[in-house]
Amino acid sequence: ASEEGIILDPVYTGKAMSGLIDLVHRGSFSRDDVVVFLHTGGIGGLFVPDQVSALLADQP
């Protein structure tokens, strides 16, 4: 997040994005390539269980 401004969970999605950024920096893609990073979840890794419980407690 400090470089790209994107907040991702540090376990799976963050590592996958880091790998993709590394591939871009290594020149694995040409300027004409279309690269898609599909994020389908993973937000659970951003919070510790107590925080999740507190968030859920406030729901109707």
Image: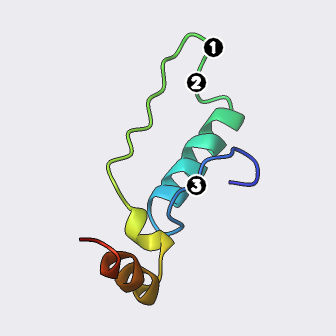
Of all residues shown, which one is farthest toward the top? Answer: 32
Q: Which residue is mark 3?
A: 7
Of all residues shown, which one is farthest toward the front? Answer: 60
Of all residues shown, which one is farthest toward the left? Answer: 60
Q: Position of residue 21 (x, y in %)?
A: 63, 42
Do residues under tags 2 and 1 come within 8 Å of each other at their CB atoms? yes
Q: Position of residue 51 (x, y in %)?
A: 46, 82
> Looking at this view, is 49 or 16 the one in front?
49
41 vs 28, left or right, is left
Q: Which residue is mark 1?
A: 31
Tell which tag, 2 or 3, sits nearer the viewer. 3
Disc 1 marks a residue whose amino acid type is Arg
**Residue 29 numbered tag:** 2
Tell which tag, 1 or 3, sits nearer the viewer. 3
Q: Dot 2 lies on which element?
A: loop
Q: CA distance from mark 2 to mark 1?
A: 7 Å
Disc 2 marks a residue whose amino acid type is Phe
The residue sitting at 75% across, 54% down in the picture is: 2
Q: Dot 1 lies on which element?
A: loop
Q: CA distance from mark 2 to mark 3?
A: 24 Å
The residue sitting at 54% across, 49% down in the picture is: 17
- Answer few, some or many: residues within 10 Å of disc 1's Cα (few below 14, many 20 plus, some between 14 and 19): few
